């Protein structure tokens, strides 16, 4: 008998830890609601988690098994469960954040002291950390080199779900336990419109994406109004679908691509999966990247502590339409288009000169797909403080970004209703319009809180000072 401790792998199929053929059987599936982890969570992610757990339990019950739910410290719960059911091993998918690794080291020691073997299985990435290195054996810090090797690196096939006969529903000594309500865990229901969790919805989203949009991904992915992205990020973050299953589906799509351009578009999407592994590699090597600059400057960066400007940014009231549309999409959907994530991050760190860690903390609170590796990597890229980051002197002009990637103003009109009746020219030129014109067009929408040209010069000066120039 063994326990499989679900964490970020809330699925039955393509689960390498659950399916481990060399581990003892039968398997008791367990999820522990850890208050130490929940303290870092947020309403959208906890709501998605509970929905995913409900779906996972139904999947197990369809197989004649069940999901055991407990709340508390896994270091106490897992040994007790192992003793109750006579388990000799506990499997779990590997995790890479600093907090997760400290937790796993502590739990492995506790289990080992009780004679229970802990096994942490590589499951959540296509290429595990440490597998792609330079000729000197060092990890890559530049994505282009890493990405080239990643595409050539052999990927594992998805693993089948365990046979029904290997799954356990527990016994009289182990009651399954109930999935608690959101309010009992942390908070009231989130106001955002969240996607359905579970393997079924994840597979349906993947199927729809690979049936057509993936062939135009390279051309359309940067246009938020096009809705051309996969929207799989919450499912990959919680593991309601396996990354190997996603990759296999993209390989099938590549094989069926109608044109060379369509084939290259599939590869472009696969490159986003490579970025995901790249940032996990960085987090594995630098656990402090969630709070410390990966690329330290000779002197401290003199960020501003402008709480009024930060509040305007969080509320989508900066007077820069593309920025505000993104921040309001975040409020409405607990998600934001990736191009817009770069725009709002650049605006916060360069135009407002506010520390990227403020933005990272806000995303951690609001995003349903918040992932320490991806988010810290993305924020440090925008802030010019990370590995392979945007050079400090390349500063997004939000108005130009809007013209390039929302040329007809569709995205802005969707999320900034005050500008629904404005012309496209007025939307793109809003920061430069005469104040009287702005008030006549959209009296309830704010004027720009900063002048981009002036803010750009101030940001350049801030970074040059930090660099000792």
Image (cartoon, rainbow, N blue to C red):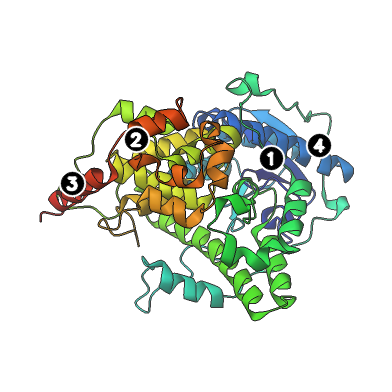
The residue singled out by tag 1 in the image is 195
Q: Which mark is residue 87?
A: none
Local packing at callout 3 (Cα closer than 10 Å; few below 14, some 14-19, many 20+) is some
Q: Is residue 217 above or below residue 354?
A: below
Looking at the image, the residue that sits furthest to the left is: 469
The secondary structure type at the circle numbered 4 is loop
The residue singled out by tag 3 in the image is 462
How far is disc 2 from disc 4 in space, using C-alphas? 60 Å
- In this rendering, does residue 440 appear at all? yes
Left or right: 333 as drawn, with respect to 103? right
How far is disc 1 from disc 3 in space, using C-alphas? 40 Å
Foreground: 50 or 165?
Answer: 50
How far is disc 4 from disc 3 in space, using C-alphas? 60 Å
How far is disc 2 from disc 3 in space, using C-alphas? 21 Å
Name the residue located 56 percent from the left edge and 30 percent from the top edge.
Answer: 73
Foreground: 409 or 434?
Answer: 434
Instruction: Specify which label sits upstream in the sequence, 2 or 3.
Output: 2
- In this rendering, does residue 83 appear at all? no
Q: Is residue 460 above or below residue 436?
A: below
Instruction: Specify which label sits upstream in the sequence, 4 or 1.
Output: 4
The residue singled out by tag 2 in the image is 448
Name the residue located 64 percent from the left edge and 23 percent from the top edge.
Answer: 189
Name the residue located 52 percent from the left edge and 42 percent from the top edge.
Answer: 412
Local packing at callout 1 (Cα closer than 10 Å; few below 14, some 14-19, many 20+) is some
């Amino acid at each position: 008998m063994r326990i499989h401790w679900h964490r970020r792998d809330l699925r039955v199929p393509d689960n390498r830890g659950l399916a481990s053929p060399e581990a003892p059987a039968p398997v008791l599936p367990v999820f522990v609601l850890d208050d130490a982890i929940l303290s870092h969570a947020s309403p959208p992610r906890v709501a998605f988690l509970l929905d995913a757990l409900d779906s996972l339990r139904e999947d197990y019950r369809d197989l004649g098994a069940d999901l055991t739910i407990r709340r508390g410290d896994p270091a106490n719960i897992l040994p007790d469960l192992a003793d109750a059911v006579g388990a000799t091993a506990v499997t779990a998918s590997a995790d890479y954040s600093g907090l997760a690794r400290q937790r796993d080291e502590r739990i492995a020691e506790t289990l080992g002291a009780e004679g229970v073997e802990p096994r942490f299985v590589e499951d959540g990435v296509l290429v595990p950390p440490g597998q792609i290195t330079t000729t000197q054996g060092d990890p890559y810090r530049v994505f282009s080199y890493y990405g080239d090797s990643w595409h050539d690196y052999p990927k594992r096939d998805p693993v089948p779900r365990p046979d029904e006969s290997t799954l356990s529903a527990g016994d009289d000594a182990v009651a399954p336990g109930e999935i608690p309500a959101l309010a009992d865990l942390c908070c009231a229901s989130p106001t955002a419109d969240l996607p359905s969790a579970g393997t079924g919805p994840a597979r349906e989203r993947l199927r729809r994406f690979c049936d057509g949009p993936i062939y135009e991904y390279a051309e359309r992915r940067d246009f938020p109004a096009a809705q051309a992205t996969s929207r799989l990020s919450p499912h990959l973050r919680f593991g309601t679908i396996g990354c190997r299953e996603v990759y296999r589906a993209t390989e099938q799509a590549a094989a069926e691509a109608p044109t060379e351009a369509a084939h290259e578009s599939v590869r472009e999407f696969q490159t986003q999966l490579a970025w995901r592994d790249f940032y996990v590699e960085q987090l594995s090597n630098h656990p402090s990247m969630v709070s410390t600059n990966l690329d330290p400057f000779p002197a401290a960066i003199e960020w501003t502590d402008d709480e009024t400007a930060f509040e305007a940014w969080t509320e989508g009231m900066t007077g820069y339409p593309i920025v505000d549309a993104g921040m309001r999409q975040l409020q409405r959907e607990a998600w934001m288009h990736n191009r817009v994530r770069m725009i709002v991050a650049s605006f916060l760190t360069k135009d407002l000169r506010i520390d990227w860690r403020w933005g990272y903390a806000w995303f951690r609170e609001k995003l349903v797909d918040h992932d320490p590796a991806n988010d810290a990597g993305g924020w440090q890229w925008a802030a010019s403080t990370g590995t392979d980051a945007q050079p400090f002197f390349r500063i997004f002009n939000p108005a130009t970004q809007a013209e390039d990637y929302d040329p007809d103003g569709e995205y802005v009109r969707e999320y900034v209703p005050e500008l629904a009746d404005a012309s496209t020219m007025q939307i793109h030129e809003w920061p430069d319009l005469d104040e009287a014109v702005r008030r006549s067009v959209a009296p309830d929408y704010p004027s720009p809180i900063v002048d981009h040209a002036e803010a750009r010069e101030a940001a350049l000066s801030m970074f040059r000072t930090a660099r000792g120039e």
